[in-house]
Image: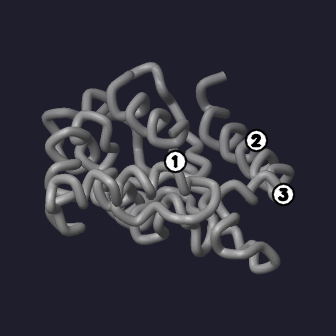
Protein backbone atom coordinates (compact mmCIF):
# COMPACT_ATOMS: atom_id res chain seq x y z
CA UNK A 1 0.00 0.00 0.00
CA UNK A 2 3.01 2.26 -0.38
CA UNK A 3 1.60 4.16 -3.37
CA UNK A 4 -1.63 4.87 -1.52
CA UNK A 5 0.35 6.03 1.51
CA UNK A 6 2.49 8.27 -0.73
CA UNK A 7 -0.62 9.91 -2.16
CA UNK A 8 -2.04 10.50 1.32
CA UNK A 9 1.24 11.98 2.51
CA UNK A 10 1.34 14.25 -0.54
CA UNK A 11 -2.19 15.45 0.14
CA UNK A 12 -1.58 16.25 3.79
CA UNK A 13 2.07 17.25 4.24
CA UNK A 14 3.23 20.60 2.83
CA UNK A 15 6.86 19.43 2.79
CA UNK A 16 6.15 17.07 -0.12
CA UNK A 17 7.30 18.56 -3.41
CA UNK A 18 6.91 15.60 -5.78
CA UNK A 19 5.45 12.11 -5.69
CA UNK A 20 5.93 8.79 -7.45
CA UNK A 21 3.25 6.16 -7.04
CA UNK A 22 4.18 2.68 -8.23
CA UNK A 23 1.02 0.54 -8.47
CA UNK A 24 -1.37 3.02 -6.89
CA UNK A 25 -4.83 4.39 -7.39
CA UNK A 26 -7.89 5.77 -5.68
CA UNK A 27 -11.30 4.50 -4.63
CA UNK A 28 -10.18 1.97 -2.03
CA UNK A 29 -13.61 0.29 -1.81
CA UNK A 30 -13.50 -0.43 -5.56
CA UNK A 31 -9.91 -1.70 -5.23
CA UNK A 32 -10.91 -4.04 -2.40
CA UNK A 33 -13.99 -5.24 -4.29
CA UNK A 34 -12.01 -6.07 -7.43
CA UNK A 35 -8.76 -7.47 -6.06
CA UNK A 36 -8.16 -11.02 -7.30
CA UNK A 37 -5.41 -13.40 -8.33
CA UNK A 38 -2.74 -15.63 -6.79
CA UNK A 39 -0.78 -12.85 -5.09
CA UNK A 40 -3.83 -11.66 -3.16
CA UNK A 41 -5.90 -14.85 -2.93
CA UNK A 42 -6.05 -14.70 0.88
CA UNK A 43 -7.67 -11.26 0.81
CA UNK A 44 -10.14 -12.24 -1.92
CA UNK A 45 -11.12 -15.34 0.08
CA UNK A 46 -11.62 -13.24 3.22
CA UNK A 47 -13.76 -10.74 1.27
CA UNK A 48 -15.96 -13.53 -0.06
CA UNK A 49 -16.27 -15.02 3.43
CA UNK A 50 -17.36 -11.66 4.90
CA UNK A 51 -19.82 -11.02 2.10
CA UNK A 52 -21.41 -14.44 2.58
CA UNK A 53 -21.48 -14.14 6.38
CA UNK A 54 -23.19 -10.71 6.22
CA UNK A 55 -25.41 -11.37 3.20
CA UNK A 56 -23.78 -8.57 1.20
CA UNK A 57 -23.59 -8.29 -2.55
CA UNK A 58 -20.57 -6.54 -4.04
CA UNK A 59 -22.26 -3.11 -3.98
CA UNK A 60 -23.07 -3.45 -0.27
CA UNK A 61 -19.49 -4.58 0.35
CA UNK A 62 -18.23 -1.40 -1.34
CA UNK A 63 -20.60 0.76 0.73
CA UNK A 64 -19.41 -0.87 3.96
CA UNK A 65 -15.78 -0.48 2.93
CA UNK A 66 -16.34 3.20 2.06
CA UNK A 67 -17.51 3.79 5.64
CA UNK A 68 -14.32 2.24 7.00
CA UNK A 69 -11.67 3.25 4.46
CA UNK A 70 -12.50 6.85 3.49
CA UNK A 71 -9.79 8.19 5.79
CA UNK A 72 -7.16 6.22 3.85
CA UNK A 73 -8.47 6.79 0.34
CA UNK A 74 -6.45 9.20 -1.85
CA UNK A 75 -9.45 9.84 -4.07
CA UNK A 76 -11.30 11.31 -1.09
CA UNK A 77 -8.46 13.75 -0.34
CA UNK A 78 -8.04 14.87 -3.93
CA UNK A 79 -11.76 15.47 -4.46
CA UNK A 80 -12.43 17.22 -1.12
CA UNK A 81 -10.47 20.48 -0.86
CA UNK A 82 -11.17 20.71 2.87
CA UNK A 83 -9.13 17.55 3.50
CA UNK A 84 -6.21 18.39 1.22
CA UNK A 85 -3.76 20.39 3.30
CA UNK A 86 -0.99 20.51 0.68
CA UNK A 87 -2.81 22.75 -1.78
CA UNK A 88 0.41 23.97 -3.46
CA UNK A 89 1.33 20.53 -4.83
CA UNK A 90 0.45 20.56 -8.53
CA UNK A 91 -0.80 17.49 -10.41
CA UNK A 92 2.21 17.57 -12.73
CA UNK A 93 4.39 16.80 -9.69
CA UNK A 94 2.94 13.25 -9.65
CA UNK A 95 4.24 10.25 -11.56
CA UNK A 96 1.91 7.25 -11.59
CA UNK A 97 3.32 3.93 -12.83
CA UNK A 98 0.88 1.04 -13.09
CA UNK A 99 0.47 -2.28 -14.87
CA UNK A 100 -2.05 -2.92 -17.64
CA UNK A 101 -4.51 -5.50 -16.35
CA UNK A 102 -3.30 -5.28 -12.73
CA UNK A 103 -5.38 -7.64 -10.59
CA UNK A 104 -4.77 -5.69 -7.37
CA UNK A 105 -5.15 -2.06 -8.51
CA UNK A 106 -7.68 -1.87 -11.37
CA UNK A 107 -6.59 0.49 -14.13
CA UNK A 108 -9.91 2.30 -13.69
CA UNK A 109 -8.91 3.21 -10.11
CA UNK A 110 -5.58 4.59 -11.33
CA UNK A 111 -7.36 6.63 -13.99
CA UNK A 112 -9.88 7.98 -11.47
CA UNK A 113 -7.08 9.27 -9.26
CA UNK A 114 -5.21 10.77 -12.24
CA UNK A 115 -8.42 12.52 -13.33
CA UNK A 116 -9.00 13.87 -9.82
CA UNK A 117 -5.44 15.19 -9.72
CA UNK A 118 -5.90 16.85 -13.13
CA UNK A 119 -8.98 18.70 -11.88
CA UNK A 120 -6.97 20.30 -9.06
CA UNK A 121 -5.12 22.86 -11.15
CA UNK A 122 -5.43 21.99 -14.82
CA UNK A 123 -2.07 20.23 -15.00
CA UNK A 124 -1.86 16.48 -15.47
CA UNK A 125 0.13 13.84 -13.62
CA UNK A 126 2.59 11.87 -15.69
CA UNK A 127 1.24 8.35 -16.09
CA UNK A 128 2.97 5.25 -17.37
CA UNK A 129 1.19 1.97 -17.99
CA UNK A 130 3.53 -1.02 -18.04
CA UNK A 131 2.63 -3.89 -20.36
CA UNK A 132 3.57 -7.31 -19.00
CA UNK A 133 1.86 -9.58 -21.56
CA UNK A 134 4.27 -12.45 -20.92
CA UNK A 135 2.91 -12.89 -17.38
CA UNK A 136 -0.43 -14.50 -16.59
CA UNK A 137 -2.94 -11.84 -15.52
CA UNK A 138 -2.95 -13.05 -11.93
CA UNK A 139 0.73 -12.26 -11.49
CA UNK A 140 0.95 -8.83 -13.14
CA UNK A 141 0.83 -6.80 -9.90
CA UNK A 142 3.68 -8.66 -8.26
CA UNK A 143 5.36 -9.21 -11.63
CA UNK A 144 6.19 -5.51 -11.82
CA UNK A 145 9.47 -6.39 -10.12
CA UNK A 146 10.58 -7.51 -13.58
CA UNK A 147 10.29 -3.89 -14.73
CA UNK A 148 11.79 -2.18 -11.67
CA UNK A 149 14.78 -0.98 -13.68
CA UNK A 150 12.38 0.96 -15.92
CA UNK A 151 10.41 2.28 -12.93
CA UNK A 152 13.57 3.43 -11.14
CA UNK A 153 14.78 5.29 -14.23
CA UNK A 154 11.41 7.02 -14.61
CA UNK A 155 11.37 7.91 -10.89
CA UNK A 156 14.82 9.45 -11.08
CA UNK A 157 13.88 11.48 -14.17
CA UNK A 158 10.68 12.62 -12.47
CA UNK A 159 12.40 13.78 -9.28
CA UNK A 160 15.21 15.47 -11.19
CA UNK A 161 12.65 17.38 -13.30
CA UNK A 162 10.20 18.30 -10.55
CA UNK A 163 12.63 19.06 -7.75
CA UNK A 164 15.30 20.84 -9.81
CA UNK A 165 13.85 24.22 -8.88
CA UNK A 166 14.14 23.37 -5.17
CA UNK A 167 17.94 22.95 -5.16
Would residue 132 appear left or right of 129 to someone viewing this image? right
User: Which colour assignment does the render follow?
Assistant: one colour
Residue at the spot of label 3: 146
Mark 2 to mark 1: distance in Å?
A: 13 Å
In the displayed structure image, the side of residue 24 where residue 83 appears, left or right:
left
Q: Which residue is mark 2?
A: 156
The x, y position of residue 122, in whole percent, is 34, 60
SS for tag 2?
Answer: helix
Give whichever of 43, 131 is nearer the camera. 43
Labelled disc at residue 116: none
Query: Residue, x 45% and y 57% (percent of image)?
Result: 44
Residue at x 35% of width, y 34% of height: 11
Q: Is residue 69 left or right of residue 106?
A: left
Quadrant (top left/top right/bottom left/bottom right) for the C terminus: top right
Residue 80 sits above or below residue 71 on the image: below
Separation of residues labelled 2 and 3 (CA atoms): 18 Å
Q: Answer above or below: position of 25 versus 82.
A: below
Relative depth, front residue between 89 and 43: 43
Pointer 1: residues within 10 angstroms few (<14), some, or many (20+)? many
Task: Using the rendered view, name the quadrant where residue 135 is placed.
Answer: bottom right
- Label pair 1/3, CB-CB below 8 angstroms: no
| Mark 2 or 3, nearer chain start | 3
User: Residue 165: x and y, percent?
Assistant: 61, 31
In the image, farthest residue toward the front: 53
Q: Residues within 10 Å of mark 2 (few under 14, many from 20)?
A: few
Say left or right for 71 vs 107: left
Of all residues shown, which one is farthest toward the bottom?
133
* Residue 121 visible, this angle: no
Judging by the rendered image, the residue that carries numbered circle 1 is 94
Between tags 2 and 3, which lies in front? 3
Amino acid sequence: MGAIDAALLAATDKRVGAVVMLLGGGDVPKILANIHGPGVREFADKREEQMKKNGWDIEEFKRKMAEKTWVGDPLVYFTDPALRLNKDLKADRFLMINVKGDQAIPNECTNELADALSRLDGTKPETKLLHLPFLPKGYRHIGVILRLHYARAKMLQHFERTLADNR
